[in-house]
Image (tube, helix red, strand yellow):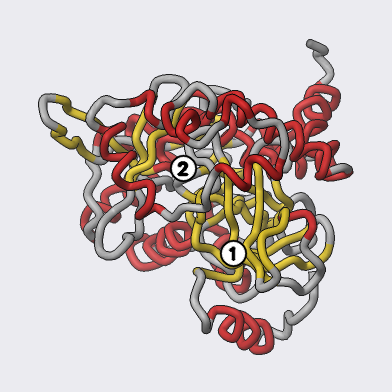
Amino acid sequence: MTDDPLARLESMLKPWHTAIQDPAAAQAEVLKQLLASYAQTAYGHQHGAPGMHSLEEFRAGFPIGSYDSFRPMIERVLSGEEELLLCEPAVGWAITRGTTQGESKFIPMTRTDLEMRVSAGRAVMNFVFTEGRFDLLQGVNLNLNFPSRAGTLQIRERTVSYGYSSGIYAKFVSERTPIRSLPTQDEIDALGGGKSLRDWEARFDLAYRRCKRENVTLVGGVVTTALRFGRYLRREHRVYPRHLWNVQIMTLGSLPGINTRLAPSLRALYGPAAIREIYGATEGMFGQQMDARRAWVPNYDLYFLEVLTRRGVKMLHEMRPGEVGSLVVSTPVLPRYSIGDLILAVRPPYFRCIGRERWWTPLRYIWGELNTLNLGRL
């Protein structure tokens, strides 16, 4: 491995950049790898994965499924039947922050799955690479993520620990990136997994005490948490984040409109930092913003990405500019899983998630774009 930091960054980013140039080839290779993994599971055997070699066979054999259709199998995996869906042991269980019909979703995470989630760091690495801002890596990442340990489940005679995917990801990725994260994920976890206002104020107080004298150059995590933390500092300490730190970049996810309707509030709190959107979910990290154009670019080299449109199922990279479709992902754990998000193709290779799969979502998106004078602009 070369000692040249520029060369190291280039080698880290090359698989992503190469896949963007030829998404069809990248997706064919991803499907090949996934089929090999599915062939090692009971669910994969049930749907004929060992004999599959083409996209047509994959679509004919594996149905598109929502969480509700996978739920019975996930509950069996929770109870110890890991071979049903997993080709390697689960190293963690992620719980969603939202709910499905009033109940939280649980998603198993494997070592391969976690390695793929590190891809969200590409947003920062690409910023450093293209802007030459290596000084960013000498600073601190303000860690506002959820706990990686939130509680336990008793499944028959088996106790299973679970946490939030952002916290599990932060704990894992902090060991593999050159920038320090404060507070550490262990410090956040020690405060417990509660979701009350008091629980969040305890985490915010910890973040303030650990970082107030540090050189914070990066803020990453859930956009609503970043906004709440900025307002907490103003309310409790009479100071804005921009008065404490010279933040260079914010890598944020979980809501549509981060670069448009939420950007003014973020910059009012944190100053003129670059904003880079991360598009992911409890099930995986599917894309991240590549440059100043205000849309994310898919991880074609890691996940298999389809969309269900009015004209049927197609590959994500086959969408036409202006077309909207419901995203279907295939991960090492979940084949052809319907995320429930509506995706807008802006222009290759740029996409936006415009919200959950509801009939009014496109109308609300257009209204928001008109109100912020952003309609059609990257």
Residue 342 seen in the figure: yes
Residue type, label 2: Asn
Q: Residue at x 61, y 30 (%)?
A: 35
Name the residue: 33% across, 50% down: 105
Q: Check contact, mark 1 vs mark 2: CB within 8 A.
A: no
**Front-most of residues 220 and 79:** 79
> Foreground residue, 212 or 365?
365
Whether residue 184 appears in this view of the structure is no
How many labels sit on residues? 2
* Location of residue 365 with respect to 64 vertically, above or below: below
- Residue on which disc 1 sits: 326
Residue at (84, 18) in percent of width and height? 4
Q: CA distance from mark 1 to mark 2?
A: 31 Å
Compare residues 76 and 135 and report the one nearer the observer: 76
In the image, is 24 to the left or to the right of 103? right
Q: Which residue is mark 2?
A: 143
Residue at 33% x, 39% y is 73
Query: Which residue is more in the foreground, 196 or 139?
Result: 196
Quick one: SS at disc 1?
strand
Q: Quadrant of the C terminus?
A: bottom right
- Viewed as shown, does residue 31 lie left or right of 19? left
Amino acid type assigned to the residue bearing label 1 in the image: Ser
Residues packed near mark 1 inside 10 Å, few (<14), some (14 to 19) or many (20 plus): many
Q: Earlier in the sequence, mark 1 or mark 2?
A: 2
Position of 332 relative to 261 (above/below): above
Question: Does residue 89 lie above or below 92 as drawn?
Answer: above
The residue sitting at the left extreme is 157
